Image: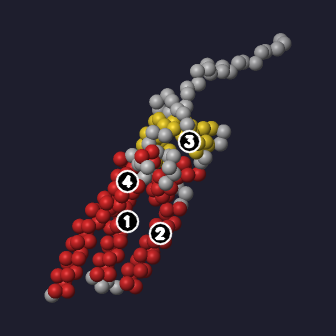
Amino acid sequence: MTDLIVRILASIAMVVLVPWLSDWVVEAVMRLLPERKRMATAVAQKVKLFLTTLFAFVVLILLAWLWHLDWRTLLLLGSSIFAIIGVALFASWSILSNITSFFILLSQGRLMHGAYIRVVDGPHAMEGQIIDMGLFHFELRDIDGNTIIYPNNFLIVRPLVVLKHPPKKDESPEPKDEEPAQTGS
């Protein structure tokens, strides 16, 4: 009976400590970063959600160990899930690849809320200020005030230029297409 009570108390302790531990880790990381590299509050909340999910997964593994669940069945299930997630994380246009790309882009110190960037797509380029960094997409505000939404995995495969200064609006008038001069008859 006492073994059962210890398992129940340990399970409750693990479940209660996961949110507290993820809060503590995010705060510790935020304190370690210099002021200019700190994450925006919204981005920090997304990192906190990711860490909480990661810690919850670790708690599930510890609970399985604590309750003496069959490891062979759990390993088979875990490896199958891991293989499916692994393929999905690196598939070119999957939702999970956008989440993976978010964390890769987040690790870049210069890509932060408020930064001005140019996304080069062949002969075309889009410039704007980062106004939101989501798990699935980035939102840019261009010089005309339009909002441009890019999927995160699109930003991973395109060259990005971090601009030192905000882009300036081109004041020159648009060239008009001139009609060719007609000759003869």
Which colour scheme appears in the figure? secondary structure
In the displayed structure, does residue 176 sit left or right of residue 79? right
* Residue furthest to the right: 184
Identity of the residue drawn at 32% across and 81% down = 65
| Residue 118 horizontal/vertical position (percent) | 57, 39
Task: Find disc 3 in the rendering and name its residue.
Answer: 162
Of pointers 1 and 2, the one earlier in the residue sequence: 1
Q: Nearer the viewer, mark 3 or mark 2?
A: 3
Tag 2: amino acid: Ile
Residue 78, image x and y in percent?
41, 75
Task: Tell me the element at label 2.
Answer: helix
Residue in the image at 43% along x and 80% along y: 76
Dividing the picture into quadrants, the one containing residue 23 is: bottom left
- Check residue 70 in the rendering and tell me which mark sits there, or answer none: none
**Res 31 label:** 4
Q: Nearer the viewer, mark 4 or mark 3?
A: 4
Nearest the eye: 153 or 51:
51
Residue for badge 1: 54
Spatial CA span between label 1 and label 4: 21 Å
Chain-order first, disc 4 or disc 3: 4
Name the mark nearer the viewer: 1 or 4: 4
**Which secondary structure, mark 4?**
helix
Q: Residue at x 44, y 42 (%)?
A: 113
Q: Residues within 10 Å of mark 3 (few under 14, many from 20)?
A: some
Residue 100: x percent and y percent? 48, 58
For label 1, the crowd category at 10 Å Cα-Cα, with few meaning under 14, some 14 to 19 and many 20 or more, is: some
**SS assignment at label 3:** strand
Kindly indicate whether the residue at mark 3 contacts the one at mark 1 (C-beta within 8 angstroms): no
Tell me which residue sits at (29%, 77%) in the image.
Answer: 63
Q: CA distance from mark 1 to mark 2?
A: 17 Å
